[in-house]
Image: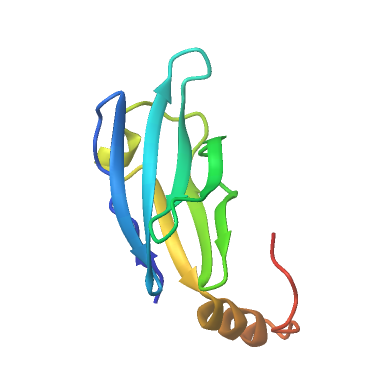
Amino acid sequence: MPAKVPFTSTDLTYKAPVTLGDEKYIFTMDWNFRSNAWHASVVRGSDQVQLVAYRRVSPGGTLLNIAAGKLFVYGKDPYDQGSFATGELVVLFFTTEEIATLLAAQGRDPEMKIV
């Protein structure tokens, strides 16, 4: 079962440490008034390598691809600053194994790349 990433703050900018698989990541979430959208930057905790720089959090899209799995964004677009707190905007982490199981259940090749 996918894990919900606990983004719930309505602050204009905040940091959220999140463990995905066996690795810790630091998410910096920024609300952008011009685009009326959250933007995420992601740093891997073990070596401080930046993996994502100010990417728009877009419902229906992938926020992050890592070896352990993928982060998908669900919700309506447009959304507002409080959408994480109300649950209208959700980020879910699916492990590589969960993705392969879902693809197999649909009769698709589990080795297929999902972007």
Q: Is residue 65 left or right of residue 25?
A: right
Residue at the spot x=38%, y=74% of the render?
Answer: 22
Res. 29 image quadrant = top left
- Residue 14 appears in the picture as rendered: yes
- Scheme of colours in the image: rainbow
Say which of 54 and 101 sits in front. 54
Q: Is residue 58 visible?
A: no
Foreground of the two, 4 or 47: 47
Would you say 61 lies left or right of 68 here? Answer: right
Q: Is residue 49 above or below residue 67?
A: above
Q: Residue furthest top?
A: 34
Whole-percent x and y of residue 55?
56, 36
Q: Is residue 7 above or below residue 109?
A: above
Q: Depth check: 98 or 87 in front? A: 98
Residue nearest the observer in this picture, 66 or 83 = 66
Please tell me which residue is depicted at 44% across the width and 57% down the height of the picture: 47
How many callouts does the rendering have? 0
Residue 39, x across and y down, in percent: 48, 32
The C terminus is located in which quarter?
bottom right
The residue positioned farthest toward the front in the image shown: 47
Q: Give how far across and how far down residue 42 sits, in percent.
A: 46, 46
**86 sits left or right of 81 in the view:** left
Q: Residue at x 29, y 52 (%)?
A: 17
Q: Is residue 96 above or below residue 115?
A: below
Q: Which image quarter holds the N terminus?
A: bottom left
